[in-house]
Image: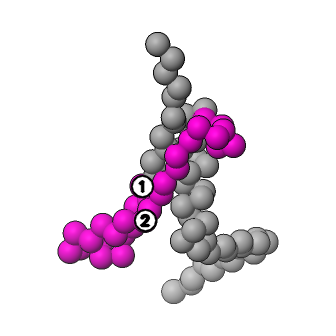
Amino acid sequence: MKMNISSVEKHQRQHIYCYQQEELKRLAIERVAQELGIDLTAKNLKIESRLLTRSNGINPTTYECEVSITEILDCKD
């Protein structure tokens, strides 16, 4: 039995970066603000974020990041 063997040489570079909890929250805030067109340097914002564990019994290591951006609007009636 004759076996055909071929090999492929790949040149690649792999980049790995691990984000810490605070950096993950900051990145999530920036993404939400970008999607909403909100300037994070504005002084009328109240910004909160938190990581939540979503353990449904299948995968207890699933996390979500909840972002809350409140715009304080001056109402002058």
Q: Is residue 21 magenta?
A: no
Q: Residue at image x 46%, y 13%?
A: 77
Residue where numbered disc 1 is placed: 66
How are the colours assigned in the image? one colour
Q: Is residue 55 magenta?
A: yes
Q: Residue at image x 61%, y 49%?
A: 30
Find residue 46 and report its horizontal and vertical position in percent: 52, 46
Q: Quadrant of residue 5?
A: bottom right
Does the image show residue 34?
no
Q: Residue at image x 30%, y 67%?
A: 54
Find residue 38 and report its horizontal and vertical position in percent: 60, 35
Q: Which residues are magenta?
A: 38-66
Total numbered labels = 2
Q: In the rendered view, would you say 13 is above or below 77?
A: below
Q: Residue at image x 42%, y 55%?
A: 66
In this view of the protein, which residue sits in the foreground, 49 or 31? Answer: 49
Q: In the rendered view, would you say 68 is above or below 58?
A: above
Does the image show residue 72?
yes
Q: Are marks 1 and 2 in contact (CB under 8 Å)?
A: yes
Few, some or many residues within 10 Å of mark 2 (<14, 14–19, 20+): some
Relative side of 60 to 49, left or right: left
Label 1's element? strand
Please tell me the numbered disc located at residue 54. Answer: none
Q: In the rendered view, would you say 7 is above or below 67?
A: below
Q: Amino acid at mark 1?
A: Glu
Residue where numbered disc 2 is placed: 51
